Image (cartoon, rainbow, N blue to C red):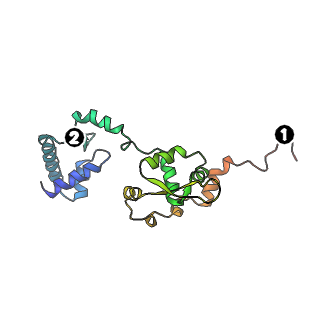
Amino acid sequence: MTEVHTLIESILFVAESPVTEEELAEVLEVPKADVRSAVEDLQTTLDEDGRGVALRNIAGGWRMYTVPKAKPYLERFAQTERAARLSNAALETLAVVAYKQPVSRGQVAEIRGVDSERALQTLERRGLILEVARADGSGQAVLYGTTELFLEKLGVASLSELPPLADHVPPAEVVDTLEGPFRPEASSPQNGSTS
């Protein structure tokens, strides 16, 4: 297998939609004829070796698919807790914990504006957060922080590598525009009276 074969396989492995031969040729800086030959060779190799993925020319491009005989096992795998994707609520909660840790359940709920107990349980069960301390004072609330697995999944060595929050916060005028419809207008007439 040549380097072109290897690179095409890598690109198609991560592609979320079919990739045209023209695009592959442009990215790899090789003639389109070489791409066509390499893709066809790769398709044959995958088929003959009985691999778990197959290469198909569909919708004007090439894409990798799982083989049909794997379908029942993939369905079973998709139902496992490990395979399930995190909900938006869990992702929001994880972001709050990552940036505000150590943080209590009540603080997370206050920031998100909704109860986050279930999301915290999911994240703890998945090994992305854990109890790192107890708050001082009455009740001694559990304080959560992220785990090494969280850093691994995110692909960073430490929390200091997280992007600054300021990079993701819109300017004040945008926030005002977005929140405007939800603010009570101080000048609106009440009970039909005018001043």
Q: Nearer the viewer, residue 13 or 38?
A: 13
x, y (%) of residue 24? 24, 53
User: Could you tell whether 99 is left or right of 76 in the image?
Assistant: right
Front in this rendered view, residue 26 or 183 = 183
Is residue 11 left or right of 1 when viewed as pictured?
A: right
Q: Position of residue 56 (x, y in %)?
A: 22, 40
Q: Which residue occupies the extreme bottom position in the image?
A: 160
Where in the figure is residue 31, as x and y percent of width and height? 17, 55
Q: Is residue 175 visible?
A: yes
Whether the residues at callouts 2 and 1 have beta carbons within 8 Å, the answer is no
Residue drawn at 21 percent across, 55 percent down: 7
State the separation of the CA atoms marked 2 and 1: 68 Å
How dense is the environment of label 2, judged by Cα within 10 Å: few (below 14), some, or many (20 and up)?
Answer: some
Per the rendering, the mark at residue 192 is 1
Q: Give SS at disc 2.
A: strand
Frontmost residue, 104 versus 98: 104
Side of 94 where 33 appears, left or right: left
Q: Amino acid at mark 2?
A: Arg
The residue carrying pointer 1 sits among few (fewer than 14), some (14 to 19) or many (20 or more) residues within 10 Å by Cα, namely few
Measured as percent of width and height from the top left, residue 145 is found at: 49, 58
Task: Report the disc number at residue 59.
Answer: none
Q: Quarter of the image holding residue 103?
A: bottom right
Q: Please indicate, yes or no, whether residue 89 appears anywhere in the rendered image.
A: no
Label 1 element class: loop
Please tell me how many numbered marks the rendered image carries.
Answer: 2
Q: Amino acid at mark 1?
A: Gly
Quadrant (top left/top right/bottom left/bottom right) for the N terminus: bottom left
Q: Which residue is mark 2?
A: 56
Question: Which residue occupies 52% across, 43% down?
Answer: 118
Report whether 84 appears left or right of 117.
left
